Amino acid sequence: MTRPHRLRVPAPAAPPLTGHLPFADAPGVADPIEVTSRWLTRGGRPWFPVSGEFHYSRYPAGEWEEELLKMKAGGVTAVASYVIWIHHEETEGRVRFDGDRDLRRFAELCARHGLDFVPRIGPWSHAEVRGGGLPDWVLARDCVPRTDDPAYLAAVRPWFAAIAEQLEGLDRAHGGPIVAIQIENELYDQPGHLLTLKRMAQDAGLSAPLWTSTAWGGVRLPPDELLPLYGGYTDAFWTEADGRRPDTCRKHFFFTHQRDDEGIGSDLRPVTVHGSEPDAFADRFPWATCELGGGMAVSYHRRPYVDPDDIGALGLTKIGCGSVWQGFYMFHGGTNPPGELSTLQESHATGYPNDLPVLTYDFQAPLGEYGQYRRTYHELRLQHLLLADFGHLIAPMESVLPEERPDGQFDRGTLRWAVRGDGASGFLFVNNHQPHEPLPDHPETTFAVEFADGKGELVLPSTPVTVPAGAYFCWPLRLELAGLRLEWATAQPVCRLDVGGRTVLVLAATDGIAPELALDTDTVAAVSTATGDVVPVGDRLLVTGLRSGTDALVEVDTADGGRVGLLVLDAATARTAYRGTAWGAERLVLSADGVVFDRDEVRLHGTGGATSFAVLPAPERAPVVDGVAAEAVRDGVFTRYAVPPASGEEVPAVEVTLVRAAGPAPEAVTGVQGRASVPADTYFDTVAAEYRVEVPDGLPPGTLLRLHWHGDVGRAYVGRTLVADQFAAGRVWDIGLDRLPAEAVRGEGLRVRVLPLHARAPVQLPEQARAERETAAVTRAEWIIRRTRPVRPG
């Protein structure tokens, strides 16, 4: 028999440092935020925030609220956003906070829905924006930007004052949502300037319990003044077009205790900074992140394709490594606003090493440029549900690595695993997924975990299993649950629910691994299950043979007279789970559609066809959809409600007419650092294939035009106005009809132009885009109908 993978979880280390940092919440707040050297607390309890980046100035203001609710339903607890200077003050002295630039309204919407807000105020943001967000008029001044040059600070000071005016009264002292403020971005070698900017922001009236800074690249920070935040991406658009994934990305799929990622932003600074120390702040600050990649942008010369499992594995691995703040960039994609004086994207024309699309900033994010749900969203939501109920347990737990672990970043054969533990209990993490390099199955796998409390070694599962290629998961170890001790489960905790006065722990099975539950007999009076077997083994009761699903409920009477349920959903069903307050109670909703919770209304985001959703616990009366009570049927322990198709006319086929076939691909041109540049605009008028798309009247709001295409660069126009663009990277191209000028579209239609890619262009394409790289065509077009269906209490 294969020996188990073994690990010992030591007793907790000395208590963390407290009170050693000059961070203080507003006096008298009910839930004061504090920072220890190992985790954060809120209201005296360990706190595990989940932040997601959403750039308000890259999204229509009329849609902000619903998108924020999508983020909240995805488990995001704090919304982060760059306050991009050039978006607000493209012309000196004309500062705009109107429309899609209304910073205050965005922050107020966060507060309305119980979301924290983290403004990242720069002044330099990067964010793939022209000038890194510094307006052209600032860069034209006789000054040295991003230093304490008085001429530069003289420009920054009124900008910070304008931000402070917009956010007045939204700090914690006034019950506002601002929990942290980031100063600058990716400035690695000027701690004095970072401190100057913090003091200037404070003098302007900005206030938050946490002041933060990005900390990758061996950054030097002013001592104890800024909370260092880290990141990690699955791939990078900013490296060379040599086809290789950067090694700095590969390492994020291993369990390590190295916080720093020296590869982020390495196109604008040295990969390693002389005299810097990786993780120099680990003894005084917790491991917090702000830029775990929720996707990746595409540049012209390098076009990463991010698989949803890449992001899911990245997120789970970072928790296992020791993260106590999961921060994702981007969580929601967007579109660059049209500039009044110039385009606003990062480009060779502005001296940057990368050419980015003029408009799209979709980022392959969990929620797309037009609010599209991506599978990444569902993978991350499953993890965030875990953190919502168990993050306060995980945050103080130290990450412990096994003695036998991978020998470097190119070891694909050694199982990657770790435990977060406190000396008596913990969570076991496994990652067997790595982008672009499938890892092998691990047959005959068991784990032996010994805790320092002397209560014996846990060996799990009872029968060896195969850890499948591509799997990543978290299993609980000695989890206390309303009087029951769950010794282990080979299924991932999702959330806890109160159902009829009893606690129900919902778990998610892993495809290919049979779920098994081990219960401490001292805490159990009786066990019953309809789908499995209960077998006594020593001082444990093993529940085996469970068929995971909506009926896989194990009911336990505890020794102290309580009742606990253990419900094991199959992997696919678990990824349809949403948890929120609906119809007067906390409920779990299963839906293949997107779900948002808004006070006493639930809204389903889908296609408008016949659908259904399941609820636990069920409301007393059937919810109402379109004025009619939904028909109810039993679905295991859930109640499932049928939703009839939305009324509406039949959707017509897309009429696409080829106006002009593509000509020869333009010769490649290189720009900054010798990287390929986007072909000149004139080629779109002369060489690109051109199609006319008829946009009929009567398409429902939210409709997308989805183009299946190949080539190099695609651009869509209404008249002479560019309305959408894309670099070919093996993905469909969505265009939101709501963003188009309606009258002009009716009169002129939509023109789509596609350039072919030159055979010798030094451009890195993903596998999905290589087959027809030198031709240019739209191969199929379809309308994607999206409808929002309110579900109200009965």
Image (spheres, rainbow, N blue to C red):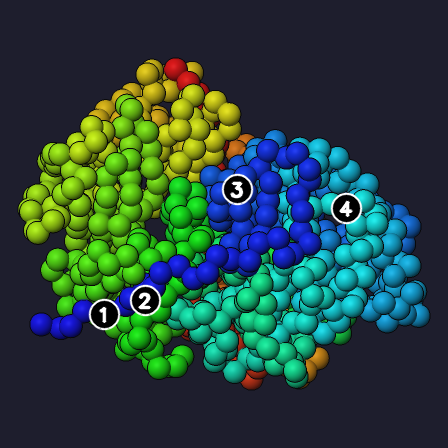
Q: Position of residue 378 (x, y in %)?
A: 40, 48
Residue at image point 52% right, 61% down: 287
Question: Which element is circle 3 on?
Answer: loop
What is the C-alpha distance between the residues marked 2 and 3?
Answer: 31 Å
Residue 734, horizontal then vertical, whole percent: 52, 51
Residue of label 2: 417
Q: Do tag 3 and tag 4 residues touch (Cβ < 8 Å)?
A: no
Earlier-in-chain disc, 3 versus 4: 3
**Label 1 to label 2: alpha-carbon separation:** 9 Å
Residue 451 is at least partly visible in this image: yes
675 in relation to 293, above or below? below
Foreground tag (2 vs 3): 3
- Report the Cα–Cα distance between label 3 and label 4: 25 Å
Q: Which class describes the residues within 10 Å of circle 3: few (<14), some (14-19), or many (20+)?
A: few
User: Residue drawn at (42%, 21%), measured in percent from left and top?
Assistant: 583
Residue under circle 4?
206
For the N terminus, give its image quadrant: bottom left
Mark sitting earlier along the chain (4/1): 1
Residue drawn at x 59%, y 44% is: 33
Badge 3 is on which residue?
Answer: 44
In the rendered image, residue 128, in percent from the top left (x then y), is placed at 67, 63
Crowd rating for badge 4 (residues with CA inside 10 Å; few <14, some 14–19, many 20+): many
Image quarter hosting the C terminus: top left
- Camera sees residue 669: no
Left or right position of 287 against 483: right
- The amino acid on which the numbered mark 3 sits, given as a three-letter code, is Gly
Q: Is residue 574 above or below residue 671?
A: above
- Residue linked to disc 1: 5
User: Mark 1 Cα within 10 Å, few/some/many (few <14, many 20+)?
Assistant: some
Nearest-to-viewer mark from 3 and 4: 3
